[in-house]
Image (cartoon, rainbow, N blue to C red):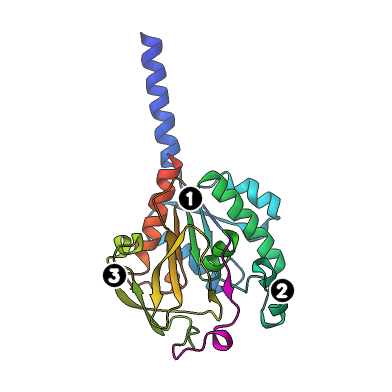
């Protein structure tokens, strides 16, 4: 009986120790400029104890292995996804590409999906997640989707257009917002969503500003937005996203 009691107490102590450790959050690129450092600072501003793992410092294979020690994956913004990845090789000259980063992130996405790990995808991150799942992109909004809305703010903290959140979406449940302004910095956008995804936010010109799974699923929970919540600290379309993602990471850890 005493041995059983000691075993139970030891198990409880070990469980509490594991739960008290910081969440390990992988970010596909979290360094190189102040803009990339913002991702980690934004997540930490929730008050939740986290450790950032910057995947850009590792080879794709090393990063995929390291992801196994993490509880969530953030796909950050950046350069264009190579158009050859979604059947538009001829448009490569219209893009600013980084094939090495593409390779890294496709491998991270594949690993995260295998593990059913929570994914937070921002700007380029949303675009590459859509492509990885089988979707396509508008190569250049000004040329291919003329609009009177600017999707590239002059200042990275500027609010340059509004988005409408679909009222029955999970995104609305997270934020409680139906319409608000966002900061935006992209010339590409989702064209066709991958099978199984639905839009949950739209710009007023129809550009997809966010997506989620069509149905409840046991796949990786995803939060995917085209705007930059890490640059919008006072917005309801910012911190609630970080908090929800980290809470999903906590659940994954258990």
Residue stretch rendered in magenta on the structure: 134-149
Q: Secondary structure at mark 1?
A: loop
Reply above or below: 105 against 187. above
Upstream in sequence: badge 3 or badge 2: 2
Within 10 Å of disc 2 (Cα), the crowding (few <14, some 14-19, many 20+) is few
Q: Please state, as top left, top right, bottom left or bottom right, where the N terminus lies in the image.
A: top left
Identify the residue position indicated by label 3 in the image: 177
Q: Residue at x 42, y 51 (%)?
A: 49
Upstream in sequence: badge 2 or badge 1: 2
Q: Secondary structure at mark 2?
A: helix
Q: In the drawing, what numbered circle is on residue 168?
A: none
Identify the residue position indicated by label 1 in the image: 220
Would residue 7 appear left or right of 60 to someone viewing this image? left
**The residue positioned farthest toward the bottom in the image shown:** 148
User: Can you tell which quarter of the image residue 19 is in?
Assistant: top left
Q: Residue at x 56, y 50 (%)?
A: 112
Query: Residue 135: within the magenta?
Result: yes
Cβ atoms under marks 2 and 1 closer than 8 Å: no
Q: Please state, as top left, top right, bottom left or bottom right, where the C terminus lies in the image.
A: top left
Query: Residue 32: within the magenta?
Result: no
Q: Nearer the viewer, residue 179 or 60?
A: 179
User: Can you tell which quarter of the image residue 148 is in?
Assistant: bottom left
Within 10 Å of disc 3 (Cα), the crowding (few <14, some 14-19, many 20+) is some
Upstream in sequence: badge 1 or badge 3: 3
The image position of residue 158, as x and y in percent, is 42, 84
The CA distance from mark 2 to mark 1 is 29 Å
Q: In the drawing, what numbered circle is on residue 89?
A: 2
Q: Secondary structure at mark 3?
A: loop
Cβ atoms under marks 1 and 3 closer than 8 Å: no
Q: Residue at x 53, y 69 (%)?
A: 192
Our reading of the magenta stretch's main secondary structure is loop
Reply above or below: 66 against 139. above
């Amino acid at each position: 009986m005493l041995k059983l009691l000691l075993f139970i107490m030891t198990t409880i102590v070990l469980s509490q120790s594991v739960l008290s450790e910081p969440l390990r959050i992988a970010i596909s690129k979290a360094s190189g400029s102040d803009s990339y450092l913002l991702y980690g600072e934004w997540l930490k501003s929730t008050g939740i104890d986290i450790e950032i793992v910057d995947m850009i410092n590792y080879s794709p294979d090393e990063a995929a292995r390291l992801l196994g020690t993490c509880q969530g994956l953030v796909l950050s913004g950046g350069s264009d996804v190579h158009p050859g990845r979604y059947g538009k090789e001829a448009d490569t000259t219209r893009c600013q590409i980084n094939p090495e980063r593409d390779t890294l992130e496709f491998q991270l996405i594949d690993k995260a999906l295998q593990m059913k790990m929570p994914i937070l995808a921002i700007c380029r991150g949303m675009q590459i997640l859509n492509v990885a799942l089988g979707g396509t992109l508008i190569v250049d909004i000004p040329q291919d989707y003329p609009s009177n809305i600017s999707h590239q703010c002059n200042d990275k903290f500027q609010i340059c257009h509004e988005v409408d959140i679909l009222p029955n979406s999970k995104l609305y449940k997270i934020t409680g917002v139906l319409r608000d302004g966002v900061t935006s910095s992209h010339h590409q956008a989702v064209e066709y969503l991958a099978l199984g995804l639905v839009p949950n936010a739209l710009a007023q010109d129809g550009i997809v500003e966010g997506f989620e799974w069509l149905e409840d699923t046991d796949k990786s929970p995803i939060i995917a937005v085209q705007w930059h919540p890490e640059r919008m600290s006072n917005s309801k379309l910012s911190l609630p996203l970080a908090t929800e993602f980290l809470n999903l990471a906590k659940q994954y850890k258990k």
